[in-house]
Amino acid sequence: MADADLRALPALLGADDPAIFSVHRAQGASPFLLLADHAGQQVPRALADLGLPQAELDRHIGWDIGIGGTTRALAERLDAWAIEQTYSRLLIDCNRPLVSPTLIPEVSDHTLVPGNAGLSPAQRQQRIDAIHAPYHARIDAELDARRDAGRPTLLVMMHSFTPVMNGMQRPWHAGVLYHQDTRFAHALLQALRDEGDLVVGDNEPYSVNSSSDYAVPVHGEGRGLVHVELEIRQDLIADAAGQQAWAERLARIFSALQPQLLAFG
């Protein structure tokens, strides 16, 4: 792919399109740092909703329902730096490696995505350059600044999952995901189970690996940070009351775990 091919494309983001991420509690004092890669469902105006009706963008395929509000509420309670990605995971999935076949999916949960069909290498690179790369560059900049200032970081990747997938009801209220580093994950898994009213998945309903995920392998394992990926079932955080309740629960649990987690570092 030549640079000329990229330059020949019309601009992906226009003046009326929103910023690609939002940072909350930019001066937060907490060691916790929250990432919400799938918080948004926006599509650049130039791509006309990727050829999809709004009802499809509103489904779990378009974003992690409820996780943006939950992340913001948790950041407020912890005084923690947090970042939300603005654009739909159907446009480009910011928790996928660049070589992943699901980085820009042509089909998602049986839904064809017309705006992703038959993209040229230049069109794919344009989305990487406009969305994926600057989003992760902002995270890298924050992590670099904290490292250089000698500040500890406890990294949490915030996600939500659909209650039903492929016709199967999922029993978990939440899932704790991890790959090679289990320090945060095992502590959080036990703390959530100790709540007494939750069914908690251990690397369920998903698992993490370096070929299907980006944030854990790159920002967590790649930097040697104490980290975890947390999944919350979407029906539990679909409204403000659920988001506030989960933020309250997680703030209490994270605060209790903080001394143990910092000792790992």
Image (cartoon, rainbow, N blue to C red):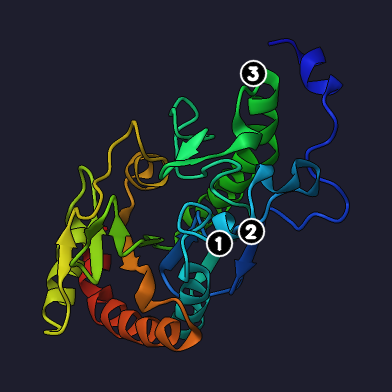
Give the foreground label among 2 and 3.
Answer: 2
Disc 2 residue type (three-letter): Gln
Q: Nearer the viewer, mark 1 or mark 3?
A: 1
Most foreground residue, 206 or 74: 206
Type of the residue with mark 1 = Asp
Quadrant showing the N terminus: top right
Q: CA distance from mark 2 to mark 3?
A: 27 Å
- Element class at badge 2: helix
Picture coordinates of residue 7 (x, y %)?
A: 84, 22
- Residue, far right: 15
> Is the residue marked by circle 2 packed among few (<14), some (14-19), or many (20+) residues within 10 Å?
few
Label 1 Cα neighbours within 10 Å, binned few <14 / some 14-19 / many ≥20: some
| Residue nearest the viewer, comparing 177 with 31 | 177
Q: Position of residue 171 (x, y in %)?
A: 18, 67
84 is higher (above) or lower (below) than 7: below
Which residue is identified by label 2?
A: 54
Q: CA distance from mark 2 to mark 1?
A: 6 Å
Q: Residue at x 63, y 52 (%)?
A: 87
Alpha carbons under labels 1 and 3: distance apart? 28 Å
Image check: 79 left or right of 264? right
The answer to which quarter of the image holds residue 241 is bottom left
State the residue lying farthest toward the top. 2
Give whichever of 52, 218 is nearer the camera. 52
Which numbered disc flags the more N-terminal residue, 1 or 3?
A: 1
Residue 62 shows up from this direction: yes
**Mark 1, residue position:** 58
Residue 261 is left or right of residue 34, and the answer is left
Dots 2 and 1: beta carbons under 8 Å?
yes
- Identify the residue under disc 3: 121
